[in-house]
Image (cartoon, grey):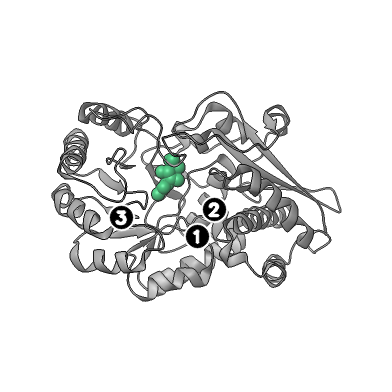
Amino acid sequence: MKIQEITPFVLSSKERGSATWASTMIVVKVTTSDGMIGYGEAVPTLRVKPVFSAIQQVSKGYLGKEVERVERNYHEWYKQDFYLSRSFESATATSAIDIALWDLVGKELGAPIHRLLGGKFRDHVPVYANGWYKDCVTPEDFAREAKNVVKRGYRAMKFDPFGPYYDWIDEHGLRQAEERVKAVREAVGEEVEILIEHHGRFNANSAIEIAKRLEKYRPLFAEEPVHHEDLEGYRKYKRHSNLRVAMGERLVSLKETLVYLREGLVDILQPDLTNIGGVTVARKVASLAEAFDVEVAFHNAFGSIQNAVSIQLASVIPNLLLLENFYDWFPQWKRDLVNNGTPVEMGRVKVPDGPGIGVEVNERILEELKTDPVALEVVEEPVWVVGGTWKNY
Ligand SMILES: O=C(O)[C@H](O)[C@@H](O)[C@H](O)[C@H](O)CO
Ligand SMILES: [Mg+2]
């Protein structure tokens, strides 16, 4: 079975999601020489247009190759590309195609990806909520929505309480963040997990001050407290803070991951299947983390195909902590894109046993919502922010 056609789609609709990129999806459709179809997903961010064209370029390296030789295909492309480990666009394009190949291998054998990877370690994957705090500004806003998250059955939730602060945070910002976190802790009680998202935007001194203020609310982890590439910042943060560090959504290779693991800079690794290198690299990264006693909480913020394949891998690795989940805050069309979705119940999702990624993609929605890739407008609130949270109170 050979790879015959690779088609990227950009999907978007007027329905606004919880964040700019929650309103967009980049889907890759791979068709084989015997007419089978597999799906993958790439990361949108602000770079929808360059990612779309990266998929067209990367495709040239995959067309005509044997579908089943996923590892070999990745290696061949690595050889050709030369800059793969330095290019987010190439990494996410390669990841999307890799996911579609795993989907195809599963479909060909009539097996879900979890069976191809050694079988389910667990039947249900525990998840945490993200995207739930759109337009939340005051502590009361956060408390109200946090209660709703618990009502929906979640036992863990993540949020960014820092508003527009960037690099440096002053006393006013520290107080605001603390009030928001305190309000959420009081709203959800002692046993629901609170995860603090910093979106990789502070210098080490600010991040350390933040940790001192927030540790009494017992967050499960501090995510990306400093900028992704700030290794010195991570070292300093680890020396002076008592919080567990989570990071990894912007890692684009196995060996880049090793840099953070080897030095003990990360306690909970958050690889993203749609840019680390698909299933092929994500499973290696999870094993590497296991060797360092690091738990994995896959980053899963984009769309329903990413969600499906992340559930597959999350179901097989022994060192899973939690899987991120935007599902209940997706625009409706994203949930409709997969025919048999996996709703969250009691803080977890059941692992589907359908072939490949475990769910079927609704082709009608692909056709209806596909748009031309255009350069996105740059507005004050960056694309990585949950919408409407950068106001002061
Ligand atoms: O951990 C995460 O999920 C991320 O850092 C993000 O991807 C954003 O929070 C989210 O997408 C909202 O913009
Ligand atoms: Mg994050």
Which numbered circle lies on residue 316? 1
Q: Are marks 2 and 3 in contact (CB under 8 Å)?
A: no
Of label 3 and label 1, which has the lower sequence position?
A: 3
Q: Is residue 325 visible?
A: no
List the residue tagged with mark 2.
312
Instruction: Describe the element under mark 3 as helix, strand or loop.
Output: loop
- Mark 1 nearby-residue class (10 Å; few <14, some 14–19, many ≥20): many
Residue 190, quarter of the rendered image = top left
Q: Residue furthest right?
A: 33
The picture places residue 299, in percent across and down from the top left corner, at 45, 51
Q: Closer to the observer: label 3 or label 1? A: 3
Q: Residue at x 67, y 66 (%)?
A: 74
Instruction: Describe the element under mark 2 as helix, strand or loop.
Output: helix
Kind of residue sitting beneath label 2: Gln
Q: Are marks 1 and 2 in contact (CB under 8 Å)?
A: yes
- Mark 2 nearby-residue class (10 Å; few <14, some 14–19, many ≥20): many
Of label 2 and label 3, which has the lower sequence position?
A: 3
Q: Residue furthest top?
A: 14
Q: Is residue 124 left or right of residue 5?
A: left
Q: Nearer the viewer, residue 69 or 347?
A: 69
Per the model, the C-alpha gap separating discs 3 and 1 is 29 Å
Kind of residue sitting beneath label 1: Val
List the residue tagged with mark 3.
225
